[in-house]
Amino acid sequence: MNHAREIILLNVFGGDKPGVTASLTGILGQYDANILDIGQAVIHDDLGLGILFEVPEKEEASPVLKDLLFKSYELGINIKFTPITEERYNEWVSHQGKKRFIITLLSSKLKAEQISHVTKIISEQGLNIDNITRLSGRVALDQTNNTDKAVIEFSVRGVPKSTEKMKQDFIEISKEQEIDIAFQADNIFRRNRRLVCFDMDSTLIQTEVIDELAEKAGIGEKVKAITEAAMRGEIDFSESFIQRVSLLKGLDESVMKDIAENLPITEGAERLFKTLKKYGYRTAILSGGFNYFGNYLKNKLGIDYVFANELEIENGKLTGKHRGDIVDGAKKAELLKLLAFKEDIHLEQVIAVGDGSNDLPMLHTAGLGIAFHAKPKVQESAKHHISSSGLDAILYLLGFRDREMD
């Protein structure tokens, strides 16, 4: 005789050991049960396993539950059964079409207060957390390595009440807690980024090369003031570029070689490029700086493309002029589009990373625009920001785990 459909949620707790899932699903298989959902997590050898299953109409639930209880006793684990109504199950099914997002939290050491703040914002926005995953390796209790990171990823579902307010809340929490928080749509593009474009000065390297050249020419303070005003967006980049280059007139070409060989490369850059290369990503420098230094980094880090400005040199001296078009903000965005076309990829598959106001056009053009240790104006305007971590933090935003990185 047929009876009402029975749906049961099986929760399993206890020490992790080989064969637990195989044994329990083996019993369910004997009764021809349908698996409607399944999930498992292991934290420090403690197993948490959930199986939502449907008992076929031809079967009774009691024998299934009895056999599962006997097997759990045999395995030394605890189990719990929760009956689920068809209405409740159908409600869950109706939620699966909702938008999904990934929120990544990066910190030197993960604290409960940080998670509390982030999850409170998620809740206030009406989003549900489906999964929490640790991407970083476990941090030693006696942490001595300042480059260690604790990174977790939240998979959330729903539509934020206000994306702008959520972003501002995350920025405030980032400043207060000295953590980085990234929020991005979980879609096919997020899982299939193919091209990463970088600004050079104050992004790939921890200096502004034009300021280094100016120091050698004895006009450091004058050029630095123009540079800072340009990066803050107070004066037009092209105008500031022409002003600064003109002040370098007469500088010996050999100075450039000395500066290139001593460029302070940003923390995490070498790990980032090794990993990107390993997994087939294409990389580019799109810089308002100079191609002499961009090409040096290209050779050192294995970068695929370099687009930057060319200084005019005659008789071994800088003339105070440049050759070709100035690579300003608009030009960077244009070059990014051209590279995407050349690589035959969608703009959503492109990542752009920069720190200055002249980087904003390419940050807005790319599918994932990251303001890296950026000025406040840039940080607020960009889609995402990294302010407390090295460049290799970008890998976590792509979903990489520590064990997958070089």
Image (cartoon, rainbow, N blue to C red):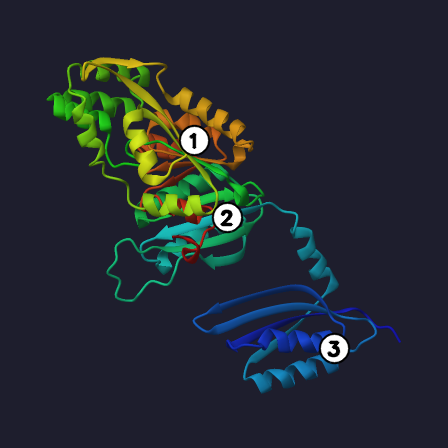
User: Is 86 displayed left or right of 172 in the figure?
Assistant: right
Residue 41 in view, yes or no = yes
Tag 1: residue type?
Leu
- x%, y% of residue 43? 45, 69
Q: CA distance from mark 1 to mark 3?
A: 55 Å
- The residue under label 2 is 102
Quarter holding residue 33: bottom right
Foreground pick, 327 / 234: 327
Dot 2, how many residues are within 10 Å of its Cα: few (below 14), some (14-19), or many (20+)?
Answer: many
Please tell me which residue is depicted at 55% across the width and 81% down the height of the picture: 77
The image's mark for residue 363 is: 1
Task: Name the amino acid type tagged 3.
Answer: Gln
Residue that appears at 40% across and 44% down: 394
x then y, percent, for residue 87: 73, 60
Can residue 121 be seen here? The reply is: no
Mark 3 or mark 1, which is nearer the start of the sequence? 3
Query: For the residue labelled by badge 2, is the local secondary structure a helix, a strand or a loop?
Result: strand
- From this view, report whether residue 371 is shown above or below residue 36: above
Q: Position of residue 70 (x, y in %)?
A: 64, 86
- Mark 3 or mark 2: which comes first in sequence? 3
Task: Kindly identify which residue carries mark 3.
Answer: 30
Calculate the distance from the C-alpha at mark 1 to the C-alpha at mark 2: 19 Å
